[in-house]
Every structure is written in C-alpha cells, then in structure tokens.
Image (spheres, rainbow, N blue to C red):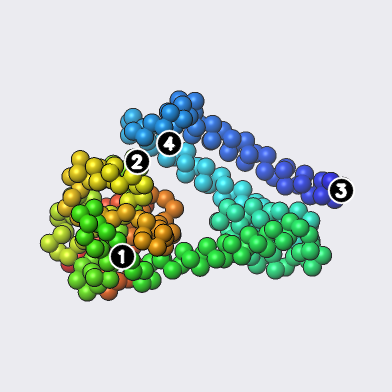
Amino acid sequence: MNPTFDHELKLVRDKMTALDSLYDDCMNRIFDPDLNARLANEDVNFELDTEEARRDFFHLINRRKRILAERDSIMLEIANENISFKIVPHLLYLIIAGGRYAGEAFVLYEQLPENVKKKSISRLTERKIAEEKKRIEEENKTAVGRSAPDFNGKSYTNENVRLSDYVNKKVVLLDFWASWCVPCMRNMPKLKELFNEYKDYGLEIIGISLDSDSEVWIQTISQNGMEGWTHILEEMDDGGKLSDIYNVDVIPTYILIDKCGTIVGRWNVLKDENIKTIADFCR
C-alpha cells in the first residue's frame, strides 16, 4: 500500500474501532456457544424459552442493525467529506452492499474524479450499483400500491389456483411459509383464527410454501389443521419461484391484496395493526 492509502485507511479504522468492538460484542452474545451448538445440530424446533429471553434476543438483533446503520453512516460521511480519496470507491461498495444508504452512495459515485473511476475497485463498485438498481427496480414491482403479479399453481388437493380469479371477488392474503420455519408455524394459530373470523367477509388466504418435499408439506397442513384455506408450492411449471416474483427473501412474509388486485400491505409479522388492516379491507 502507498502512504496516501495507508493514511486514508487509518482514518477509517480510527472512526470504526469503537463500533467494531460493539459489533463483535453484540454478535458474540447473539451467537452464544449454546445457540451455535443447537443451530449446528439443525434443531428446527429451537425456540427461546421465555418471553424475557425472546425480548433480549430481539433487542440484540435490533442493536446489531443500529450498529451497522451507524457504521454505514460514518463511511458515507468520510466519503462525502473526502471525495478524492482513493479509498472512497471501497467505502461506497460497502455502503451499497449494506443497502441502507444506497441512493446517497449512487450520487457520490457520480462525483468521483475520473481518474478514480478508472481504478478496478471503482469498476466493481459500478457493477454493484447496477445490481442494486436492478434489485430496487424488481422490489418496487411488488411494493405496496402496485398490481399483484398473477400466477397459476396447483393446490395440495390438485386444484388449479389462479390469483386473478379472485379479482373483484376476494381480499387475498398471501402467506409465504415453510414447514421448517419456526416463526411461520408459531403464527399459524393466529392465521387460523384470522381466517375463521373473516372468511365469510371475503377473505381468502393462499399459503405459498417454500418446502421442497411435497409429502412433508401436505403432512404439515393436515397435522396443523390448516386445510381451511388454499395452499400451493412456490415453484411454478416454468421453473420460476413465487418468492422471486414477489421479492420474498424472509419468511414468514404476508402480502395483502385488495379486491382490485392491488398490493395494500406487506409484513413479516402479524401485529394487531396489520390484522386491523386486513379486517378493514374485508368490510
């Protein structure tokens, strides 16, 4: 490394040291030895034992997110104040990968001196920008306010399921789930209660499973009393996946579609306010 780059790197490290220490401590507490052992043994029934333990765990998860957001904010500040530094393309790449300040990073990249843009890391950053812009464009296709993409599928009872058949007839809640997903299965009693309460008011639930084993999928539906609503697997006849079409990268994901076929809600948990939203559209 040349002296200039060393100086730039030291500036970044000096500002990051305290945050790195906080991050390491947070991650060590999230992935304690006992939790690691249970995850390594693929304990799919793993659950945090008490409400207090769950609260502490999710507090750590949120703390980790805040630390990462602060880290990206610091890198953005350094890049903004030192746009001619050779390290800036590296910082912009990391910021874009983090996804929190991608828009600001796009703008800063355009301000880089031409000689810096010719560096190999700048070309990598440019490709990362193109990837992120494409991801955002795809994500926006299934954002709240957009028309829900139509799809065909076969239910577990071998019936044809087409989303567009529900337009002007039903309010549809898409439930992306899997039998191995603990949070998904924990929410099933709430989903069952929701369906029973509003099915006569125009609510239809379409469960879209990410299971790869159809026998396990059908068995899970039967054993958990989930037969009341429609179920399909995410993989379609053309090899595409509904989780890709709807930009679902975390399950459970719930997508609410009104009778006009417009996406009006998108959540990863069913909070009371989300259930109220569903109820309001069914009235």
Type of amino acid at the residue the image marks with label 1? Asn
* Structural distance between the alpha carbons of marks 2 and 3: 51 Å
Check contact, mark 1 vs mark 4: CB within 8 A: no
Tell me which numbered mark, 2 or 4, is placed earlier along the sequence.
4
Q: Is residue 126 left or right of residue 147?
A: right
Residue at the spot of label 4: 57
Q: Nearer the viewer, mark 3 or mark 4?
A: 3
Q: Which mark is residue 258?
A: none
Residue at horizontal 33%, vertical 69%?
150
Tell me which numbered mark, 2 or 1, is placed earlier along the sequence.
1
Q: Residue furthest left?
A: 200
Residue 58: quadrant of the picture: top left
Tell me which numbered mark, 2 or 3, is placed earlier along the sequence.
3
Tell me which numbered mark, 3 or 4, is placed earlier along the sequence.
3
Check contact, mark 2 vs mark 1: CB within 8 A: no
Residue 152: quadrant of the picture: bottom left
Residue at the spot of label 1: 152
Decide: is 9 above or below 172: above
| Residue 269: image location, x then y, percent | 34, 50
* Structural distance between the alpha carbons of marks 3 and 4: 43 Å
Q: Residue furthest right?
A: 3
Tell me which numbered mark, 1 or 3, is placed earlier along the sequence.
3
Residue at horizontal 20%, vertical 62%?
203
Q: Which mark is residue 180?
A: 2
Q: Element at badge 4? A: helix
Check contact, mark 2 vs mark 3: CB within 8 A: no
Q: Nearer the viewer, mark 1 or mark 3?
A: 1
Tell me if mark 1 has few (under 14), some (14-19) or many (20+) residues whose alpha carbon lies within 10 angstroms of its own: some
Residue at the spot of label 3: 2
